[in-house]
């Protein structure tokens, strides 16, 4: 990687995500720090990365005003972002386990051990939970009891979050490929090869298309049924941000310091804004605004149609999670 090593990158990714949740979106859970998960509210579902297939990243939950801790659960390593569905919290850890906890009291319901770190946020659908692992596999488990259903082996780490749509799992791997798998059997439907790793950018499904960013500098749109390339857009550096889709617009950050707005149907450029640092974080769309965090220590809000800067919030201090080997 051209700017920093993998572990530094991952720690910065967690920092931006945490800061966005704390300061902008008042989302349904609080920071994930030092192998612990702290729950803020359990009344709403959050069944996949950024909450929905379009990855708009907005929760309907009212902000928690007392900042009290309901419970705390310790794992054997740093943890990834949780998925919440039907009063169960699912999350992976760098101790190689996927955990399912009671969202009310934090009691463990089950755990499943893989052969590698789990940085992939899970997706829950149709009584199943889908996620990737750094043992190079994509897994499907019974969401109720953690029973193994199937796994599919890719060529390298699977850190990006899967998307479930109409019986198909769409997921990217660091082996440079995007996969479409039958959600019931795990059979391969199609795969598409990019020209670089897909490290943390996660698949988004909208308008019959699958969108994702790659370290080859491109944003891709593929036909969800066939896997054929519909369009790709080249940025100025690698893309590890996950797109957000709304009203025919695609929003995504790049390590070239820019937030881009593209036409989701044909990839045409709409607007961009240059910050003072790489953008690893994934944009969030709310109303007429799009929000994103930058490594420059600021959170930005733009008119999502024109790209006009609405406001920015400069953090007094940034912090990093130090991931152990």
Image (spheres, rainbow, N blue to C red):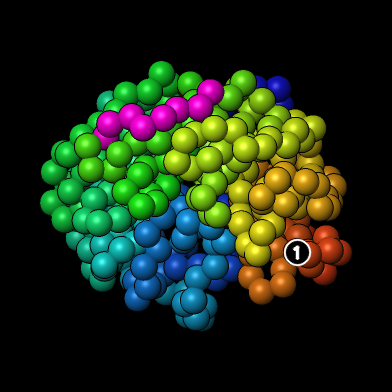
- Measuring from the top left, give residue 29's x and y in whole percent: 44, 64
Other-residue count near label 1 (Cα within 10 Å), few / some / many at <14 / 14–19 / ≥20? many
Q: Is 279 inside the magenta-drawn segment?
A: no
Residue denoted by label 1: 304
Q: Nearer the viewer, residue 137 or 180?
A: 180
Q: Nearer the viewer, residue 205 or 5?
A: 205
Residue span colored magenta: 186-193
Residue beneath the point at 50% across and 70% down:
59
Residue beneath the point at 36% across and 68% down:
45
> Relative to residue 72, is residue 227 depicted above or below?
above
- Measuring from the top left, give residue 77's x and y in whole percent: 36, 39
> Relative to residue 100, is residue 225 depicted above or below?
above
Q: Nearer the viewer, residue 142 or 281?
A: 142
Quadrant placement of the N terminus? top right
> Relative to residue 205, is residue 200 depicted above or below?
above
- Measuring from the top left, give residue 203's x and y in whole percent: 51, 43
């Amino acid at each position: 990687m051209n700017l920093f090593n993998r572990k530094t990158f991952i720690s910065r990714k967690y920092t931006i995500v945490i800061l966005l949740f704390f300061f902008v979106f008042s989302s349904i859970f609080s920071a994930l720090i030092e192998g612990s998960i702290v729950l803020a509210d359990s009344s709403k579902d959050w069944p996949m990365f950024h909450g929905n297939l379009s990855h708009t990243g907005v929760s309907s939950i009212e902000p928690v005003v007392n900042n009290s801790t309901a419970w705390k659960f310790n794992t054997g390593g740093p943890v990834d972002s949780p998925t919440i569905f039907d009063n169960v919290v699912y999350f992976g850890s760098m101790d190689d386990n996927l955990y399912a906890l009671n969202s009310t009291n934090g009691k463990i319901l089950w755990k499943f051990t893989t052969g590698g770190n789990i940085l992939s946020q899970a997706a829950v659908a149709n009584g199943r939970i889908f996620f990737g692992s750094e043992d190079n596999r994509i897994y499907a488990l019974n969401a109720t009891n953690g029973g193994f259903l199937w796994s599919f082996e890719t060529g390298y780490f699977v850190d990006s979050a899967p998307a479930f749509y109409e019986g198909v799992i769409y997921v990217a791997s660091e082996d440079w490929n995007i996969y479409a798998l039958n959600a019931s059997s795990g059979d391969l439907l199609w795969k598409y090869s990019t020209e670089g790793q897909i490290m943390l950018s996660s698949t988004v499904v909208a308008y019959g298309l699958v969108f994702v960013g790659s370290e080859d500098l491109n944003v891709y749109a593929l036909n969800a049924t066939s896997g054929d390339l519909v369009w790709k857009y080249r940025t100025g550096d690698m893309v590890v941000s996950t797109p957000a889709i709304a009203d025919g617009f695609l929003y995504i950050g790049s390590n070239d310091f820019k937030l881009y707005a593209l036409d989701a149907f044909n990839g045409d450029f709409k607007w961009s804004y240059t910050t003072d640092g790489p953008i690893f974080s994934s944009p969030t769309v709310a109303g007429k605004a799009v929000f994103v965090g930058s490594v420059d220590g600021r959170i930005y809000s733009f008119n999502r149609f024109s790209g006009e800067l609405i406001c920015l919030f400069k953090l007094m201090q940034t912090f990093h999670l130090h991931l152990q080997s």
